[in-house]
């Protein structure tokens, strides 16, 4: 019965996505929904940017394991990211009328920087998108009682997301996000009341968390702990700004004001609602400690199964339907955009310059072909990764923090920045980060923080040592 209801969710989501595909007439429709989304759809697409597998399965149980200071990146960092985008980047993105964030680097710095940043951002999506497919595999594996192997579940999930994203692009994502957000909110709010009651009420849950020192936010006043804490927050809060999925959700709004408002409202909604799964996971500790504590003690990724296991073992069928429906919707809404984003970047900013005479119809076909290839690549990455969903997500934004953020911010706010500065920034940032990751990953200074510092120095040195910039407006 439960499996049947979950399959119904899948069928409805795919049906909405296929119906939305009728609106796709050209590349602009496919990548940014014709820049026509109203405020309520802009809000739900922005909310769905982060509310995915890691929020429900991994962030929630990371809190149970490590407390508030263990989740500084998500939801705190990611929520700040959306606020920063709304206040400092959304207007600039929208006014430039671009298809991808890679187009910004081309117009501001030229083709070499466009190519380098597009490659870096595309590669960064492997971890983020793999996390969503891994979560889909967990859902199917759990629902089947282990009958569906995790690898098969990942393949089934990838196929489901691919079907409607392939045909409808951003239009399918926007409309399915609207449906899926409603399911997420209704399902998790209902479960908060149910599990909170089973745990003795919200006051009992908060009191237990407080007595266990899980609500302490700041780390110990030791240099290494403070630096690690700040690096985790910074990686999520600003390292995730130069990402195509955020860009495409912002620029899909019908006008500049909607882009700003939708992003701000979506940020607040995400920050507030991300604590619902956290509350659910901590309630599980009070309801069934005999199940939760052994999972928390494991060295692998099994701790992510706390909520699914509790729901299956301790709640009625309706609650199971609501939880797995909400979980599935959360993953689908994030995974679809996470597949389209690198596809858009790779096709528009890496492949298209090689074939400048390609027509719009051929380009749209190429986009869909690349989407299939990227889905297969991400699926293989997910099958071979042993990192937790939370770890895969956090590692994603180290790449863009040290390579793409400084050229983006400087390109908007520092007129003196040049292409030479952007290239030196990327080179120094990546070399410093990779060097420390390989040879001193556990040193005093977090590698991504050092890489970010070198990126800033590289931009400054390269720009002041080169002629003043000239705008680049074409390929």
Image: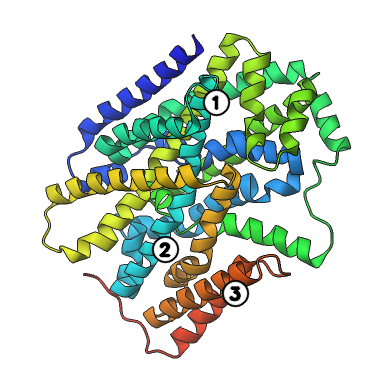
**Quadrant of res 175:** top left
Residue 204 placed where, x, y %? 83, 25
**Quadrant of res 13:** top left
* Mark earlier in primary sequence (3, 1): 1
SS label for mark 3: helix
Q: Residues within 10 Å of mark 1 (few under 14, many from 20)?
A: some
Q: Which residue is mark 1?
A: 185
SS label for mark 1: helix
Q: Residues within 10 Å of mark 3 (few under 14, many from 20)?
A: some
> What colour scheme does the image use?
rainbow
Q: Which residue is mark 3?
A: 453
Estimate the spatial distance between the alpha carbons at disc 3 and disc 1, rounded to whole Å.
Answer: 40 Å
Toward the viewer: 145 or 197?
A: 145
Toward the viewer: 420 or 79?
A: 420
Answer whether residue 251 is visible to the viewer in this image: no
Q: Which mark is residue 120?
A: 2
* Mark earlier in primary sequence (2, 3): 2
Left or right placement of residue 353 versus residue 123 in this view: left
Please give the name of the residue rendered at 57% of the width and 43% of the height, measured from the top-left corner.
389
Q: Is residue 86 above or below residue 184?
A: below
Please give the name of the residue rendered at 80% of the width and 55% of the height, measured from the top-left corner.
219
Q: Which mark is residue 168?
A: none
Residue 82 placed where, x, y %? 53, 50
Between marks 3 and 1 in the image, the one whose residue lies nearer the viewer: 3
SS label for mark 2: helix
Answer whether residue 454 is visible to the viewer in this image: yes
């Amino acid at each position: 019965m439960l499996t049947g209801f979950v399959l119904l969710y899948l069928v409805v989501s795919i049906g909405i996505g296929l119906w939305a595909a009728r609106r796709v007439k050209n590349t602009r429709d496919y990548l940014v929904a014709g820049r026509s989304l109203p405020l309520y759809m802009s809000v739900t697409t922005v909310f769905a940017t982060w509310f995915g597998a890691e929020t429900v399965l991994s962030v929630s149980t990371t809190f149970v394991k490590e407390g508030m200071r263990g989740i500084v990146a998500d939801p705190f960092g990611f929520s700040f990211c959306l606020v920063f985008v709304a206040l400092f980047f959304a207007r600039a993105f929208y006014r430039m009328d671009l298809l991808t964030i890679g187009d910004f680097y081309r117009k501001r710095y030229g083709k070499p920087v466009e190519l380098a940043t597009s490659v870096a951002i595309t590669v960064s999506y492997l971890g983020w998108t793999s996390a969503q497919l891994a979560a889909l595999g967990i859902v199917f594996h759990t629902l089947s009682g282990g009958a569906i192997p995790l690898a098969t579940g990942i393949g089934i999930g990838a196929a489901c997301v691919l079907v409607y994203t392939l045909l409808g692009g951003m239009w399918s994502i926007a409309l399915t996000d609207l449906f899926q957000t409603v399911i997420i909110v209704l399902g998790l709010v209902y479960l908060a009341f149910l599990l909170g009651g089973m745990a003795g009420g919200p006051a009992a849950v908060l009191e237990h968390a407080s007595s266990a020192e899980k609500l302490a936010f700041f780390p110990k006043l030791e240099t290494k702990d403070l630096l690690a804490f700040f690096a985790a927050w910074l990686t999520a809060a600003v390292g995730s700004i130069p990402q195509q999925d955020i860009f495409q959700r912002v620029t899909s709004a019908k006008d500049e004001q909607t882009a700003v408002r939708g992003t701000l409202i979506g940020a607040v909604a995400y920050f507030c609602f991300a604590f619902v799964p956290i509350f659910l996971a901590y309630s599980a500790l009070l309801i069934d400690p005999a199940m939760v504590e052994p999972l928390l003690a494991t060295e692998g990724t099994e701790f992510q199964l706390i909520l699914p296991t509790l729901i299956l073992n301790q709640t009625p069928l309706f609650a199971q339907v609501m939880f797995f429906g909400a979980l599935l919707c959360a993953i689908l809404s994030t995974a679809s955009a996470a597949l389209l984003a690198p596809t858009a970047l790779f096709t528009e900013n890496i492949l298209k310059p090689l074939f400048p005479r390609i027509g719009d119809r051929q380009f749209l076909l190429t986009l869909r072909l690349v989407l299939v290839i990227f889905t297969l690549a991400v699926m293989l990455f997910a099958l071979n990764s042993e990192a937790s969903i939370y770890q895969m997500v956090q590692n994603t934004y180290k790449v863009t923090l040290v390579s793409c953020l400084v050229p983006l911010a400087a390109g908007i706010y520092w007129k003196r920045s040049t292409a030479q500065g952007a290239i030196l920034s990327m080179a120094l940032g990546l070399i410093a980060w990779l060097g420390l990751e390989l040879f001193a990953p556990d040193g005093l200074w977090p590698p991504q923080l050092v890489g970010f510092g070198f990126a800033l120095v590289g931009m400054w040195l390269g720009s002041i040592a080169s002629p003043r910039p000239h705008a680049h407006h074409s390929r």
